[in-house]
Structure formats: structure tokens, C-alpha cells
Amino acid sequence: MAKATRRGFLEVMAVAGGAAVGLAAGDSEAGTAHAASPVCPPTPNASTIGPDDPRYAELVTRGYNARFMAQPESVRVVHSAQQIVQVVNEAVRANKKIVVRSGGHCFENFVDDPSASIIIDISEMNDVYFDNRHKAFAIEAGATLGKAYRSLYLGWGVTIPAGGCPSVGAGGHIAGGGYGPQSRRHGLVIDHLYGVEVVVVDRSGRARIVVATRDARDPNRDLWWAHAGGGGGNFGIVTRYLMRSPSAKGNDPSTLLPKPPARQFVVSASWSWENMTEESLSRLADNYARWQQQNHAEPTFESIDSSLTMYHRSSGKIELFLGMDAAVPGADGILWTLVQTVGEGVGIEPTFDYFSAAPWMKVTLSYNSGAGADALMFKSKAGYLKKPWTPAQLKVIYRFLTEGEGDVGASVYLMSLGGKINAVDPAATANPHRSAPLIGFFDIGWWDPAEEEKWLTAIREVYREVHADTGGVPVPGEAYDGAYINYPDNDLADPALNTSGVPWHKLYYKDNYPKLQQIKAKWDPKNVFNHALSIRLPGASHSLPPQPRPDASRRSARTEPKKYPARVSPRHVNNLRSLGQSG
């Protein structure tokens, strides 16, 4: 640990200038060939993998949240949009429930649900290339964000402002309107979405491939709009995204998407729980939130990515993470001042767990973000914040973070938004949340299925109390701006837990929901693609389907849990800085 002095901070920054960072734990047919490949390799055949196949266990235990596990009739591993069409046609004819896995994260049971008959696994469709036909970058929906970042940057020196966790799948993340470390400077990832290729099913039950773009002349433009924040699993199966910034001119690929910083400053300052009181925790959280509220639109600070991670007392510390473009004049001094501002009046001297500068890609791919294959169960809840939590709310949060014996996997996060995210009209994309400077995030994790009810009760109670003035949920208004669909929470559709009178779809989509319903009716009139929080057809019920109950037998189907040295908070285990993730 380095003593928190400005001189020590700047000296280490200078010395670390070249060091690596060690971060803590009409319809258009698809298929533009890769411009750089004169001969394409043969496409493997689709695989049908049933319960008797040794690969089956591998594929059905890939879910991110071990609370949920599907037992489908088969898993179909596909390699092309045409193969997806064949599988979908077969499933629709047989009236079998289809779900899609791109290989990344999902917090709820949208894929791993007992109702699923066929899981279409598109994780092998993971290429990233420049599509000459559309003059845009193609990211296949099975690619992880880490794959996309590496390919885009090494190939053309560009990036997309998506999530900070490399193992997230592009499939659900982009459709949900993902955000990440570059979003305050460049907007949401969907603000750079030029087009989307989707397998849809028409009223006759026939599957086909459609390409939809943001071009005002495109008759399929509504399908593009719906995928610009409408969430995954609603309208069809995305096979690839086409990325090109709206302001881009010309056809030089190296100019068509944002360029990331050449070098990034990264800082982790922490405050010990040893002497942390309710007053000091409240001051720390309030200082951080007020700085974000007051400065989120300041151009000088738009490259700052930050989060305040309030781990449970048993973790020993509370962490402030900061990242910033090292090329911004005086960036080191700005970060130092921010650490001091957040810690002002707390009464506890911060220490630096790490502070350094390194090449952008090294920082970006350094996060320890393995998917949840270690039998970790968890529940996460979140909401957009327009202003800081009140003293009464912080009192509830302090109690949540200090109750319980042993290593309790509870955490509360404040994460920065604003900047260019909020410069876009709420109706321009399906994601309407363009006014909040912060997201508040709550999670809790556990290993033993027998403890599920205990921990679900704990996190539901703190979330309900924090939002007590608005019916237990973050109702859009003066203090909140609703919820983010890439942090799905089935509780928002439960009238016992959401007593606001505001339906779950209003929390996620606000005034954009009726348009999404009309697009659903046009492109998925048979409701082939659905899950607990999917867009409903006009006139359909919005009640929540029956939910799975805790099942102790699930553990035996998974690997034995790793014995991590401390908390099992999902984000502590996986170090998820900017989740924005569902994939």
C-alpha cells in the first residue's frame, strides 16, 4: 500500500508510466465475406447435442448465475445465420421453446429456464471484421467484448464504448444499450450502432434473415431502433452487429469508430472498514455522488470512468476506482484532486491499492472477469440515480453492509454515467435513460442453495427500503430514472415487491415501450422469442411467469465451488467494473 500523499501519488505515477497494470481480482440476405480473406474456410455443420452427449453438461452449465440451470432437449451449436434459420424453422414447426446463448452474462433466467426446449448456442459465431458492403465493422453476436476490443484496436486502432468486462457477450449487451469506461466520452455502444442482422419469424412461422440499419430510407429501420436499447431475446436472434459512428465520414475504416486513449491512468484508492462509522460511510458516498452529479457534463472530466465500491464490512475496505485518458492535460492532478474530494471529511486516510499508467488495451483486457461457472449464485438489483441518496437511504445501506457474520457477499456500488450518454434524445434509440449521472447497484452472492431465501430476502429488503418513497422501485421522476434492462431484475414485475403502481416495462423503457410493442407485433407476431421481461405483444399480459424455486440438486450438476479467500459478491469475484452486461 502507498501512503496517500500527493507527492507519493505523482512520483509513483511517473515511475509507472511504462508499467503494466495489475488490476484486482427490404429483406437482405446475410453474409458479407471478410474483405481480407480471398478464400473463406468451410463453415462447420451445426451440432445437435443432447443429454447423452458428454458435451451437454459443458453447455448447460455455462450460465453466469448458478441460481438457474436449464435442462433442454438439446443444445444446438451453430456457425452461421443460415444454420440458425434451419434450427428455428424446426423448433417453430414442433412448437418448442427456443432460447439463445451468446456465451456471456445474464443475471436472470432468460436462457437457463426449465421452459427452454432448445438452446441455440451462437458462441462460435464470434468473428470481428470490416464489412465492405455496409462500410461498417461487423461484430458477430457470439463475440465477447474482449474479442471485439482486441480485434478492432489491433486491426484498425478503433473501439466501441461498451462494457468494461471482457467476458461479456456482444449478443445481449449491445441490444440492451451497453455502457462502459469510454461511454462518458463517446456515448452508449448503441449510439454507434449502424445496423443489425437478425433471424426473425413471420406470421406464417417461417424464419428468415433481415438486415436493418439506421438509414432513414431503410424500410426495416424500426427493427434497428428496437435493437438500439430494446434488450436481447425480444424480436429475433441477432447474428451480427454493424458498427459505424453517426458522425463518421468517408470509408477509411480507421476513422469510422472512436479511438481509445493511447494510455490510461488507473487508480484504486481504498478506505478501511476498521474505523468506518455510519457517518463516515455516508459522507464518502455522498461526496462521490455529488461530484458526479455536479461534474458529469464537464468536458474536461468526460474521459473519467469511476465507481465507488462499498463492499460488506467483512471485506475490510471500500474502494474508489478511477480511470482517465493519460493524454488529458493535468490528468494526474485531476485524479488526485478527485480522490481528495471523495475522501473529504470522512476521517479515514485512504491508501492506494494501485495507481499506474499503461497502454489502453492492456488496461482494458486486464480485468479478472471470468464467467460464473463456479456454482456462485447471486441476485443483483439496480436503478438510475439523478441525485445522491438521502441520509435515510444511506442509513439503510450502512446497515446492509454491516449486518451478518463471517464473509458476507454483499456489496453496493455507485457508478458514473452522464457525459455524452446524456447528449442523446431519449426517443432517438430504444434506451430512454439519458438524464442520470449515476447508477446505483446492489448485489449479494452465496454458494449454498439452502441459503437462497435468506440472501434474497436481505437484498430485496434493502432495495425496497432504499426506494421506500417510490413503492420499492426506482420510479422515473425527480430522484430516479428507472432501471436498465441489461441489469434485469424479475422482482420489478412482482406486485408484492413493486408496490409503486408503475409497471416493470415503464421502469425499463419509459415512454418508448408502446413503440417497442408495435415493433414486436410486426417482427415477432407469434411471440417466438420471449422471456420473463421480454417485450409483450399489444394486449398481452405483463404478469411474471412462475419462477423457479431453490433446488439443492443444482450444485451436483456444476463444478464444486472454488474457495475464494474472501467475499463471494459477484462483482468481487469477477471484478465487474462497468457491468452494462447481459449477453
Image (cartoon, helix red, strand yellow):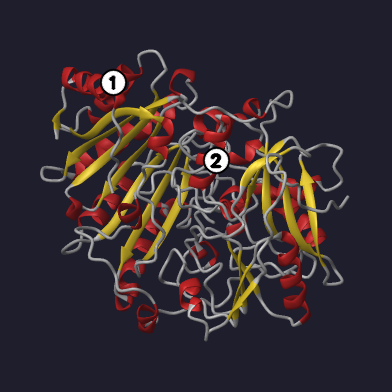
Quarter of the rendering containing residue 20: top left
Residue found 56% across the figure and 52% down from its top: 143
Residue 421 location (% of width, % of height): 56, 33
Q: Farthest residue in the top direction?
A: 329
Element type where label 1 sits in the image:
helix
Q: Which amino acid does label 2 sit on?
A: Ser
Instruction: Identify whether 331 is placed above or below 218.
Output: above
Residue found 80% across the figure and 45% down from its top: 221
Q: How far apart are marks 2 and 1 (CA)?
A: 35 Å
Quarter of the rendering containing residue 203: bottom right
Q: In which quarter of the image is the N terminus?
A: top left
In the rendered view, does 206 fall on the left or right side of 24? right
- On the image, numbered disc 2 is attached to which residue? 151
Q: Which amino acid does label 1 sit on?
A: Thr
Q: In which quarter of the image is the C terminus?
A: bottom right
Residue found 50% across the figure and 40% down from its top: 150
- On the image, numbered disc 1 is attached to which residue? 337
Tell me the tag on residue 499.
Answer: none
